[in-house]
Amino acid sequence: MAKLYFRYGAMGSSKTANAIMVQYNYRERGQSALLVKPAMENRDGARIIASRSGLSAPCVYIEDLTLEEAAKHDCIIVDEAQFLTKEQVEKLVLIVDDLNVPVVAYGLRADFQGNLFEGSHWLLAWADSIEEVKTVCWCGKKATWNARIADGKVVKTGAQIQLGGNESYTALCRKHWLRGELKPSTFIFRTIRQEEAEQAVEIEKICFPPNEACKREYMIPRIAAAADFFWVAEDHGRIAGFINGIATNEECFRDEFFTDASIHDPDGKNVMILGLDVLPEYRGRGLGRELMRTYSEQMKGRRLVLTCLDHLVGMYRKMGFRDLGLSASVWGGETWHEMEK
Ligand SMILES: [Zn+2]
């Protein structure tokens, strides 16, 4: 029995190229597959479908397709199926059920606001087979959203169909669509400003459990005394993460470094790292590693010392640190490894 297939995917998932290839495959077998699209989708001007990759093929408009014509073919392939009306999807159902001709419809699932298109709505409801044509966001995750872009920014209001405008579309994962991020953040690395001290206190609270987080009463004097050793990653004016420490000629880590900023000796040859913080929404993109790399460069040849919990030893090893075994630190009632580089 013939089936109605709906193959949906985001912008740039090669749906049109796939449609043209399916027709080609029918031809190779000596059969006939007819390419069809809704007439309202006329950005190519003529009765032609064209893929971004450069493939193109003639087609007919679904408005002009009669059941008599459809019956002459072995398959009907629909491009831009999101623009179909409910009646046109009903016509495809008749072609499948009454003529026993399979129909393969390619289209977007949802618009630039995440709402279903009319055609996609009915195809999702009525198709015998629903398949996803995949593509990826810049971050590598599956892209499921079609972002409308105008003047280099993601636009979230406006008409569903806007033909002939100067906007363009790109596929993003849900997270980056919601955040309106079209490309990776480019962080600015710099030392902290005094007026950012409270912001740093808040970030510390978010990044660490209460027993491990550095309290405000210690953080504020540290920023006042050792701002040159407190580096932040700024993303559009906001601190995304930071790394901080104090310098000393002492060799081993002790917990007073956390609480007594007066120990800081700007000429100290060892830098005791007191925290590496990355806000949750910036995790998983190597920002911690990038902060550490920048910090190491800025500390020019000084020995870096840090303490970390057992499960983070591997991560710091990858950043070039060597495990010195258990530290004397009992900060937060935990057992700490001391590491150096
Ligand atoms: Zn993404």
Image (cartoon, rainbow, N blue to C red):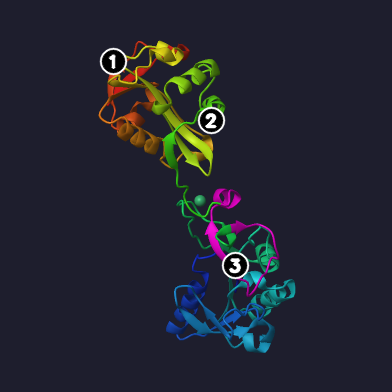
The label number, if any, that marks residue 167 in the structure image: 3
Q: Which mark sits nearer the N-terminus, 1 or 3?
A: 3
- First-in-chain label (2 vs 3): 3
* Residue type at numbered disc 3: Glu
Which quarter shows the N terminus? Answer: bottom right
Vertical position of residue 94 compared to residue 260: above or below: below
State the mark number for residue 249: 1
Tell me whether the residue at label 2 lies in contact with that at label 1, contact meaning CB atoms closer than 8 angstroms: no
Amino acid carrying mark 2 in the image = Glu
Asked if the residue under mark 3 is in contact with the one under mark 2, i.e. CB atoms within 8 Å, the reply is no
Q: Is mark 3 within 8 Å of ligand 1?
A: no
| Residue picked out by circle 2 | 196
Q: Quadrant of residue 302?
A: top left
Q: Residue at left 45%, top 40%? A: 284
Give me the C-alpha separation between circle 2 and circle 1.
Answer: 28 Å
Q: Which of the 4 image quarters holds residue 326?
A: top left
Q: Is residue 223 above or below residue 334?
A: below
Q: Residues within 10 Å of mark 1 (few under 14, many from 20)?
A: some
Q: Quadrant of the C terminus?
A: top left
Mark 2 near ligand 1 (CB under 8 Å)?
Answer: no
Range of residues picked out in magenta: 154-180
Visible residue check, residue 269: yes
**Residue neighbourhood size for the residue with mark 3, other residues' Cα within 10 Å, grouped as few (<14), some (14–19), many (≥20):** some
